[in-house]
Amino acid sequence: MNEFVETYGYLALLIGTFLEGETILILAGFAAHRGYLELHWVIMTAFAGSLCGDQLFFFIGRFRGQSYLAKRPKWQPRIDRVNSILERHQIWLILGFRFMYGLRNIIPFVLGSSRIKTAQFLILNVIGAVVWAVLVGLGGYIFGHTLELALEKVKQYEIFVMVSIAGLGLLLWLFHFWRQRH
């Protein structure tokens, strides 16, 4: 497990944060605390993955916009909610959408299909990605430290903790996916 995390940890983090990322970033922060990854590289990798993914989704929204969203009628209630928030809190929405569970992946598409200028989205997206990567990455790191204080012999539990966090993230994703289908 240690060798796997050390070999593929940053790549898995980059791909995971490109697609969504909270769970994998918490795991990477925990792995950094345990010494398998470097915290500054965890934060930079998460920043890069999140920024690139959201920029891509923004550009898909910009160039395929309404036709792309129209092909996903189940997204409509969330699209309406995003548009409602966008009307009142445009800047805060762009800065904070990474923290909005259930809307996080749809928002860049909706923003891309709106009248928001590309440069404005890019600047606010960079700021939001930095804040998100630092807070969530440090959160995982601090979680590891707290766990170590609570459990004197954390080494014997670390695989269980990592698998539990990953399992919880997978269960939340599956529940969210199932809820979208029904």
Image (cartoon, rainbow, N blue to C red):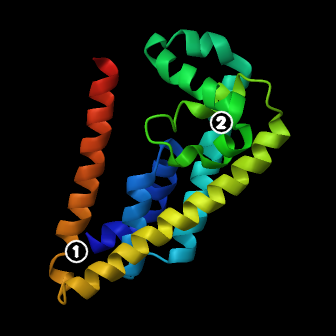
Horizontal and vertical percent position of residue 64: 68, 17
Q: Could you tell me which secondary element the residue under label 1 belongs to? A: helix
Report crowding for label 2: few under 14, some 14 to 19, many 20 or more residues within 10 A (C-alpha).
some
Kind of residue at badge 2? Leu
Horizontal and vertical percent position of residue 71: 52, 10
Report crowding for label 1: few under 14, some 14 to 19, many 20 or more residues within 10 A (C-alpha).
some
Q: Is residue 8 visible?
A: no
Where is mark 2, residue-wise? 56
The C terminus sits in image quarter:
top left
Horizontal and vertical percent position of residue 35: 39, 82
Kind of residue at badge 1? Glu
What is the CA distance from the residue labelled 2 to the residue labelled 1?
35 Å
Q: Which mark is residue 39?
A: none
- Front residue (pair 121, 79): 79
In the image, 122: left or right of 140?
A: right
Where is mark 1, residue-wise? 158
Q: Could you tell me which secondary element the residue under label 2 belongs to? A: helix
Q: Residue at x 15, y 81 (%)?
A: 156
The vertical placement of 118 against 125, above or below, is: above
In the image, 12: left or right of 3?
A: right
The vertical placement of 120 against 60, above or below, is: below
- Front residue (pair 82, 12): 82
Q: Residue at x 22, y 60 (%)?
A: 163
Q: How many labels sit on residues?
A: 2
Q: Quadrant of residue 97?
A: top right
The N terminus sits in image quarter:
bottom left
Horizontal and vertical percent position of residue 158: 22, 74
